[in-house]
Amino acid sequence: MPFHSPPFITNTNTISVLMSKVLLALIPALLIWVYLYGAGSIIQFFLCVITCYSIELLILKIRGKAIRLFLQDGTAMITALLLAFCLPPLAPWWLSVCACIFAMLLGKHVYGGLGQNIFNPAMIGYAIVLISFPAEFAVWQGSFLNDINIDFKQAFGVVFLQQEAFSYSSATLLSESRGQAIPTNINWLEQPSFYLSISFLIGGLFMLLLRVIQWHIPVGVIIGLCLMVFLAHSNETLLDSLSFHLFTGATMIGAFFIATDPVSAATSNKGKFCYALMIGVLVIIIRTWGNFPDGFAFAVLLANLSVPIIDRYLKQ
Amino acid sequence: MNLTAILIIIFIVLLFGIIIAWVSKKYRTNEDPVIAQIDQMLPQTQCAQCGYPGCRPYAEAIAKGEANINLCPPGGEETVKNLAQLLHLEIKPLEKTQESNLTAWIEEDKCIGCVLCIKACPVDAIFGAVKQMHTVINKECTGCDLCAPVCPVDCILMLDSEALAKKTL
Amino acid sequence: MLTTLKRFFSPKTQPSDNKIAPLTPLLPPLLPSKLYLPLYNERQLYLQAKVSISQHILKNQIIAEGIEPSALLHSPVAGTVLDIIQHPSCSSPQKKVQTIVIQPSMEDPWKDEPTLPLNEEIIYSQLALLSEKKLEILHTQLEKSGIMGMGGAGFSTIEKIKISHRKAVHTVLINLCECEPIISCDQGLSEQQPEEILMGTMSLLNCIQAKQAVIIIEDNKAIAIKKLQSYLQNYPHITLKIVPNIYPSGHEKQLVSYITNTTLTAEEKPYDLGYAVFNVATCYAFYRACHLGEPLTQRLITISNGEKNINQWALIGTPIIELLDAQGIKYDSNNQNLIMGGPMNGLALNNSHIGVAKNTNCLVVLPKNQTHTSLEKHSPCIRCGECVAVCPSNLLPQQLFWYAQAQQNEKSEQYRLFDCIECGNCAFVCPSKIPLVHYYRQQKKDISEKKLEQYKIQIAKERYEKRLIRLEEKRQKHQKMLEQKRLQAQQKLAQKNKQKALQPTSENSSQEAVSAAVAKARATALSRKNKNQSKD
């Protein structure tokens, strides 16, 4: 039976168009990341993208879904890239593969695939490997700014052949700040996380302009974060300063790219804002009193959990 | 020591037993709420096709476990499904089916005014008097088909909404 | 600056630009070879033919009537009734209904039947105070004009006027916002006939006895605004309100919200706030009825294929295909959709030989690949919230979709499903291309049917219970009566016994009389016997 339902015209916007806009917004950060971390990061990106797409293809086949339709939409690409930004650039290959499998499987397809997941898939994958293999995350590659520059051969050796990576590593500002009190007067221009944060910010503003995302979530996250910093800290050491929390760790990528995942976020505008505030507050709580250097993944997952109740009380 | 414990427990059990007995007596509902619930689900056509004189008696029979839940043709599969859900029974296919949403229509030029249909109608939806032409109040008719068989001149038709709209033109 | 900021923070996107049709001068009505006039009107009412096959008829002659006095069909031309056939109509494209086929007469198709009576009271540019009796006469006369709401809903205009008068409407709103992106017939009409529209508005005001009228017009109709303003000084009771051109501003609820700044809920009608909304085409038809005495037999239609838009006068009943052919628009039923109404909220027709109806404001031919074609092929909802941003009723379409799929009717009602006006904005912007409006319509239908059924069940139950009580009462009454009768009988007997007890002698005497009679009889018998014996 032919099916005719108004409207008989639609705009050209599709999920893949939406996702390509997100990809476009990720390009500046991608370039900076590759510039800072070199060959390892490129290997890591390809590894994540290939794994995510293979898993997606496999599961779609098993579930008997329209493969072309779902592979075209580009959501697997976004998940893969976000994961690659979270993992250490010289992480062993099995770590990335595990993260991708968990992300696609436990984050997305067990709930029924695209649009049904209650958690952010990338954050599920990341959180599982972070809890399971904390040692691997302790080794973070030093950036180009620390004069650490490795070629493909070295990176390949570390990622696939289990070669020693310690010589390339350096502590990140976030993990360093937990051990000792760093004075506030640091030169941000020497910090890789500053450049990355700025590039994510630019990408995020670009998405806001294209109206891929709405202002409620990024603004909410940052307001929640600021609020908590002012409430909980006295601004004496670096750990207490606002700029530190804004420009280290996953704050910017989180506020613009992770928390804004529409599927797992709250529905109404008020709800979105409330959800974002919660993330901002939780991030600072976990960073200050928690066991992990950065709590963005956990903050997002906890907020995802409370989405049903937010939706129930903040309908419009 | 053991004896005291046992005595205490017996005492507590007795106490709660008395409370429960008192509460159940005090707040007893006069009506079985299940019957009302079942009755609410039935289509209230009062057609008696289930073998009971009306929807309410059928509901009572179901509640007692005397009647099957698949005896209501006007309610259709939907009613069977709802009843099965309420009473945790298996869904059974209907014994006989019936086209739903019918309305009785009296061919007025044939009607002889015998008032037999008026007596048969369970919802008083037929209007008329002895030796006067009768007519059906369409809005109130439940389509139970009880009036058609009693008509001595076969002037009552059961129409669907489309045919009715054409007739009432 | 402030507006750009506001737009940035609450991004209400617009489905598509309301392209102003390159206005050709309005074309006079085309005389078709045949006219198809269905005996089934825009409000799903059957009509009864008042003409017979091969009868000769005049223009404006009443050819069909319905149970509502204003549900009328007039012949748009003089000619002959060719046949009465089963044919699909605009109001029922899926099923065939009885349709009168008229062939215009070759010599004089425009030969008139005596027209409607004219009333001087309502044709002035000033408000006239009319008595209730006079108004009633007026309304009855105007019922014969057969005017219907020409914006799309097809509600009888005279009925609307009567209700508005009853509800003491103080302000009449004239809708000059096109109801859909492609349509431009209202604009065309107001550019060509501005004064007639104002005159029609005054007649409406007088018929309703309202105080003022507001013409609501979208800001992209500059010529129409200018023309209307130049005539407005003669009409002190009519004002013009210019509103932004954002679909669906032509919807009744949106119009009222422009004036009152409150949104109507699903249950409320504009009358409840003292407003009545009339389409501008209705207003013009009303002018023709009041001032020229003509019934409604023709209307302005926008004909479009997405690129070319033409406004054309068409007789009611003209086959669609002849209108399209006259404009050189090709329609291929395999690859194209023929849509009555606009592209956002119209109705797909599968037969191009249907006659146009009184509420056909637009005919669009669009390629099929642009449409939502199946329920299975679309991507899942990713809850992106594009639909929330464009919803004119401030609903959460993605939640409604969720509950519609799960058939959770109660939840949908909590999320105000019935406030949805089915404008199609959400489905237009949806990146997953979900036919959202289809889901909402299905669920609304489902809920309404269930509610109606529940209501009917309730009524039937009440009537049944009342009948049982009545029968019981009757039985008891009957029993009482029987009881009384028995009592009466007993009393009578008792009385008799009493009387007998009072006169015991008479009883004895009677016994004596009996025994005496018996003795006498015996005696006679004995004597007879003796006689017989003596004979022997």
Image (cartoon, rainbow, N blue to C red):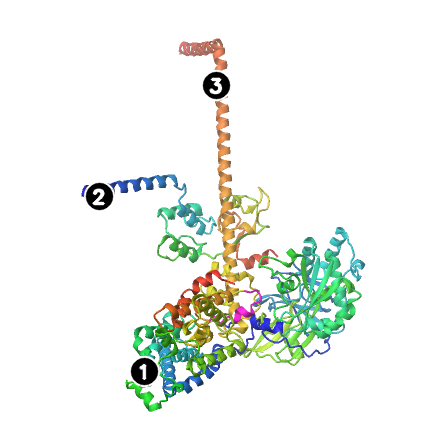
- Amino acid, disc 3: Ala
Q: Is residue A144 left or right of residue C167?
A: left
Neighbourhood count class around disc 3 (C-alpha, 10 Å): few under 14, some 14–19, many 20 upward: few
Whole-number angstrom distance, CA of label 2 to CA of label 3:
78 Å
Q: Vertically, is C170 above or below A130?
A: above
Are the residues at dot 3 and dot 1 in contact (C-beta closer than 8 Å)?
no
* Tag shown at residue C467: none
Mark 3 element type: helix
Q: Position of residue C533 (x, y in %)?
A: 40, 11
* Res. C366 visible in picture: yes
Mark 2 element type: helix
Q: Position of residue A233 (x, y in %)?
A: 43, 68
Mark 1 element type: helix
Whole-number angstrom distance, CA of label 3 to CA of label 1:
117 Å
Along the line of sight, which residue is nearer the eye, C95 or C78? C95
Q: Which residues lie in the magenta part?
A: C381-394
**Direction left: furthest residue:** B2
